[in-house]
Image: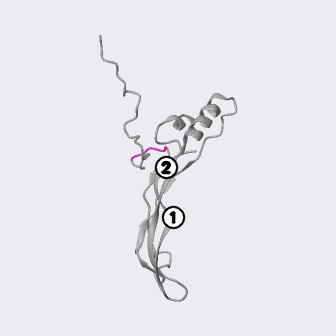
Amino acid sequence: SPQPRTQARTPHRVHRRGIDCGGDSRMCCRQEFFVDFKEIGWEDWIIQPEGYHMNYCAGLCPLHMAGVPGLAASFHTAVLNRIKAASATAAVNSCCVPTQRRPLSLLYYDRDSNIVKTDIPDMIVDSCGCT
């Protein structure tokens, strides 16, 4: 008898950290985006870094995406979306949002021209998912 194919239903590009945008996919993904502090006029008070990859989430979140491991923002939203999908009022899609963020270390001048180093929370988007 043929071997059961246990992994046939798992999409290849889905992993725990979610999906990075690439190709022509319109599904929820993480878009890499670099901010240059010179371009936004902050180079006079930010010493380091000169910029950073802030990244953002973009794309569609059809209801079936809620059940895909690594894409649901939480178990709670996955269950909620299953209920939405099963009901007749499930016309509203969920939103593509950051599911993991990291702080950014910043070296800058404060108002009194002191040099300050701080970690600013939630500045870098690491992965995205559907709410």
Residue occupying the point 46% across, 75% down: 37
* Residue 68 point in image, percent of width and height: 48, 36
Asked where in the image residue 52 lies, by quadrant, the reply is: bottom left
Disc 2 or 1, which lies upstream in sequence? Answer: 1
* Residue 24 point in image, percent of width and height: 42, 45
Asked where in the image residue 126 lies, by quadrant, the reply is: bottom left
Q: What residue would you read off at disc 2?
A: 128
Main secondary structure found in the magenta portion: loop
Residue occupying the point 58% across, 47% down: 95
Q: As drawn, which residue projects farthest toward the bottom?
A: 112
What amino acid is found at the position of numbered circle 2 in the picture? Answer: Cys
Say left or right for 8 vs 28.
left
* Residue 16 point in image, percent of width and height: 42, 43
Asked where in the image residue 11 lies, by quadrant, the reply is: top left
Please tell me whether mark 1 sits on a helix, a strand or a loop. Answer: strand
Region of the chain picked out in magenta, as a range? 23-27
Q: Nearer the viewer, mark 2 or mark 1?
A: 1
Residue occupying the point 39% across, 47% down: 23
What amino acid is found at the position of numbered circle 1 in the picture? Answer: Pro
Q: Residue 26: say if magenta.
A: yes
Which of the two residues, 72 or 88, is positioned nearer the viewer here?
A: 72
Q: Residue 72: say if magenta.
A: no
